[in-house]
Image (tube, rainbow, N blue to C red):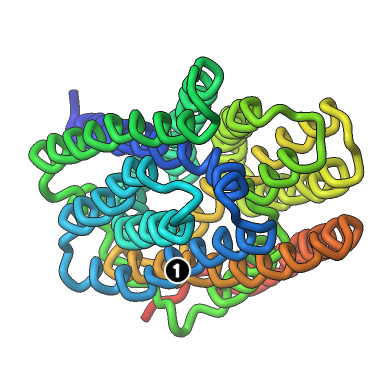
Amino acid sequence: MNKSTSIKKRAFLFLLLLGIISLLSDFTHEGARSIYGSFLGLIGASALVVSFISGLGEFIGQAFRLVTGPIADKSKKYWLMMFVGYALNLLVIPLLMFVDFSNWEIAIILILLERVGKGIRAPAKSALTSFTAPHLGAGKSFAIQEAMDQFGAFLGPVFVFIVLAFNKGTELEGYHLAFGLLGIFAVLTLVVLFISKIKYPHPDEFETSSKRQSIRSNKSFKYYMIAVALIAFGFIDYPVMAFHMSETTKVSVTVIPLLYALAMGVDAIAALIFGHFFDKKGIISLIWAISITLFMAPVFFLTNSIVGVIIAVVIWGIGMGAQESILKAVVSTMVSKEKRATAYGIFYSVFGSAWFIGSLIIGYLYEMSLLYVVIFSTFFEILAVLFLMIYMFHKENTSEFIKNE
């Protein structure tokens, strides 16, 4: 086995370990996330509160990455930030089993802390994944990562569904049991994380390129951030969908996490497909994906049938798969590894800020008219597609896609 093949194999094995970490962690927090909306509704929160907390959680978790990204780049303490972030991200979830009708505000605090934990570890995790890109391809690296990530995100809600379906106590006791059992997988995540750190103490050495690419002077990066913001602004978060299903459709509360599992399964498949096409075709693969998601809001909110809900959930999963793989893969092609965690911090902050503002507006519009929600979401996703096309043409007609500092 020659040196190049050996490095590629090690990079792939490292990526698989990161994937296992993602699988277990997403099993935990996506299992919990699948019932956040209905749980908050059960213990007394309104639609506006659910939407607000959903958006605020994303905003805090994403905006915090403006700080954690540069820290990761300057300190190179990628593993330390992973440990701290995952511990906070996951260990607060079993604490939700102690929340009831009398203290639902505590649930909001814990859910927000879970997002903070993700904000701490996300730039470091994305940077670690990107270090394998020179050997495996940016699209493939992030697609494999996302596929394993979403396999866990598929299994977690299925697990929660089973717990709720076979629960013999009250509905609230079923939620408490689900949150408590998810804590087991939180601990397993930290165990695998420790093993990974021991086996690969310096994963940044996988990428040896000396080319330095700027953030500040990179116009394409700025244009891309605008497109990312538009995508996030009009995208509807699942807790809002879960609230809508539990309140206005014929979907049983116990089926809601199962539908989320379906979305996560679609997400994983979509990530692999669009990640492959990204390495072949570039940004056009993202344009295709977002174009498909344009139909999610009309189908979901303007129909009241089980078939319509399922179709909408599948479309939503396609959009999430593209967001979690291609959006991050593009960033890895723009910025050198010395600034990559910083770039991911900016990327996540832009995405999260737009998601927060958009979610707040969607929650407000939801209480006025479902048609307003549909118009709002569809308009901004169309605008995102148009801006991605402008970005693509700009990149093709100039030499600014990659600039040296």
Q: Say which residue appears at 56% left-offset and 79% top-offset.
A: 219
Camera-side residue of 129 and 310: 310
Task: Determine whether 97 is above or below 53 in the image.
Answer: above
Q: Say which residue appears at 55% left-offset and 48% top-offset.
A: 43
- Total numbered labels placed on residues in the image: 1
Task: In the displayed orientation, state which residue is furthest to the bottom.
Answer: 217
Q: Is residue 17 visible?
A: yes
Camera-side residue of 25 and 337: 25
Task: Determine whether 378 is above or below 274 in the image.
Answer: below
Crowding near the residue tagged with mark 1, few <14, some 14–19, many ≥20 C-alpha atoms within 10 Å: many
- Picture quarter with the N terminus: top left
Percent coordinates x, y for residue 282 in the rendering: 61, 50
Percent coordinates x, y for residue 123 in the rendering: 35, 60
In this picture, residue 146 sits left or right of residue 17: right
Q: Say which residue appears at 49% left-offset and 20% top-offset.
A: 167
Q: Is residue 136 visible?
A: no
Secondary element type, mark 1: helix
Camera-side residue of 296 and 130: 296
In this picture, residue 184 sits left or right of residue 34: left
Percent coordinates x, y for residue 13 in the rendering: 25, 30
Which three-letter amino acid code belongs to the residue tagged 1?
Ile
Residue tagged 1: 60
- Picture quarter with the C terminus: bottom left
Camera-side residue of 255 and 356: 255
Quadrant assignment, res 319: top right
Quadrant assignment, res 316: top right
Percent coordinates x, y for residue 192 in the rendering: 20, 33
Q: Say which residue appears at 44% left-offset and 56% top-offset.
A: 103
